[in-house]
Amino acid sequence: MNDTSSLEQDPRAWLAGVLKEFSCQTGTLHRADGEWLDLVAHAGVPAELIPKIARIPFGKGIAGVAAATREPVELCNLQQDLGGVAKEDARKTQVSGSIAVPILTPDGRVLGTLGIGKYAPYDFPEDEKNRIAAVAAGVAALWM
C-alpha cells in the first residue's frame, strides 16, 4: 500500500509510486480550493494539457465530476468513449482505462482528487478500486 509520508516533500515522486503500484502510466493529484481543483502533481500528461488541468472546476472532466459527485469516475476506454464526462482534449493523453477518486474527509468534504490511467483499455477490478480509495483516504488523513 502506498505510503503518504513522502507526499508533502515530493508530490511527483509520491505519485510515481502510486502509478507503479497500480501499473499505470499517467496520473494527477489535485487539491480542492473551494469549488476548484488545483494541480499538485502530474505524471505522463502531455505538456500542452497542463494549463487545461492546472485548475479545474468541480463538475468538469473526470476529476471535476469525481469531486462534484464525491464518487469515483471510471472509464474503460477513454479513447473510444468519453462517457459524457471526459473532455475531448482528454484523448490527447493517450489514456484508455482511467479512474479518478475523490479525496474526502470522514464527513464527506472534498479535499481533492487522485486520478490514474493506463494506455490500454482497462476495467479496474473491485480490489484495485478499494486500494485506490485507501490511497485517497491516506492523502485525506495527511491533508486534514
Image (cartoon, helix red, strand yellow):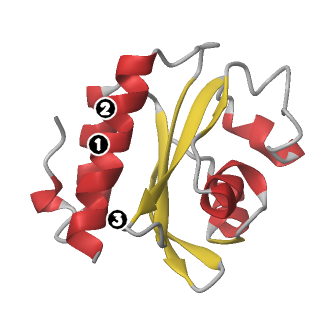
Work out whether 64 lies above or below 26. below
Q: Label 1 is placed on what type of residue?
A: Ala
Label 3 Cα neighbours within 10 Å, binned few <14 / some 14-19 / many ≥20: few
The answer to which image quadrant residue 139 occupies is bottom left
Tell me the residue that label 2 is attached to. 131
Q: CA distance from mark 2 to mark 1?
A: 5 Å
For residue 55, side relative to residue 138 (left or right): right
Decide which of 133, 27 is in the foreground and name it.
133
Taking the image as drawn, is residue 85 in sight?
Answer: yes
Quadrant the N terminus occupies: top left
Q: Are marks 2 and 1 in contact (CB under 8 Å)?
A: yes
Quadrant the C terminus occupies: bottom left
For residue 43, side relative to residue 19 (left or right): right
The answer to which image quadrant residue 38 occupies is bottom right
For the point 68% across and 63% down, which residue is it? 68
Tell me the residue that label 3 is attached to. 106
Label 2 residue SS: helix
Q: Label 3 is placed on what type of residue?
A: Pro
Q: Label 2 is placed on what type of residue?
A: Arg
Q: Are marks 3 and 1 in contact (CB under 8 Å)?
A: no
Label 1 residue SS: helix
For the point 26% across and 28% down, which residue is it? 21
Tell me the residue that label 1 is attached to. 134
* Residue 25 image point, x, y percent: 46, 30
Decide which of 122, 11 is in the foreground and name it.
122
